[in-house]
Image (spheres, rainbow, N blue to C red):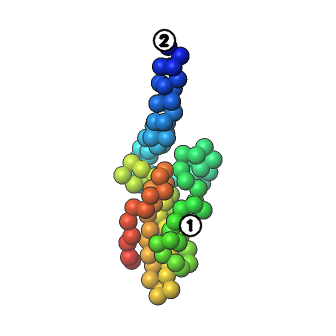
Amino acid sequence: MDSRLLRLCALCCLATFPTLAAMAYACQKEGQDVSQDEVLQMTENGHIEPFPVILEKAREYRSGKLLEAKLDCVGQRYVYEIDMLDHDGQIRALRFDAVTGRHLDLEED
């Protein structure tokens, strides 16, 4: 095989790796608890965004006091769920895709 073609194939594989990694780390069971050890391992391996990165994004949507944060399996994806107490005394729930860091929705309790 031509070395240029081989290099092109290798570059194509590398370009698709993040997508494949995200698919490989999709959670398998709805409502599955994710242990702290699993969260740490996935963060250290780069499979999910570190919580401080997600918290910074959450603060762009809502200011206030962090009440609770957890990583859940929702619809076969890992989702950070963050509850914030805003300055009006309202609890705001924010959700972020743990792999991409994308904001998913905003709910008011």
Q: Which residue has dot 1 on it?
A: 56
Identity of the amino acid at label 2? Met
Q: Residue at x 48, y 19 (%)?
A: 5
**Which part of the image, by quadrant, shows the C terminus?**
bottom left
Residue 72, can we see it?
no
Q: Quick one: SS at disc 1?
A: helix
Label 1 CA crowd tier, 10 Å (few <14, some 14–19, many 20+) = few
Label 2 CA crowd tier, 10 Å (few <14, some 14–19, many 20+) = few
Residue 40, can we see it?
yes
Q: Quick one: SS at disc 2?
A: loop
Q: Residue at x 52, y 52 (%)?
A: 34
Left or right relative to 3: residue 30: left
Where residue 28 sits, quadrant-wise, is top left
Identity of the amino acid at label 1? Glu
Left or right relative to 54: residue 31: left
Q: CB of mark 1 within 8 Å of CB of mark 2?
A: no
> Residue 44 at what x, y percent from top left?
63, 47
> Residue 45 at what x, y percent from top left?
60, 43
Q: Residue furthest bottom?
A: 88
Q: Which residue has dot 2 on it?
A: 1
Residue 75 - label: none
Left or right relative to 41: residue 108: left
Residue depth check, mark 1 versus mark 2: number of the one nearer the observer = 2
Q: Is residue 105 above or below residue 14?
A: below
- Name the foreground residue: 89 vs 4: 4
Q: Is residue 102 above or below residue 14?
A: below
> Residue 84 at what x, y percent from top left?
50, 75
Q: Residue at x 48, y 75 (%)?
A: 62
Q: Residue at x 51, y 30 (%)?
A: 11
Q: Give how far apart the Cα atoms at labels 1 and 2 are.
A: 48 Å
> Residue 76 at what x, y percent from top left?
39, 48
Mark earlier in primary sequence (1, 2):
2
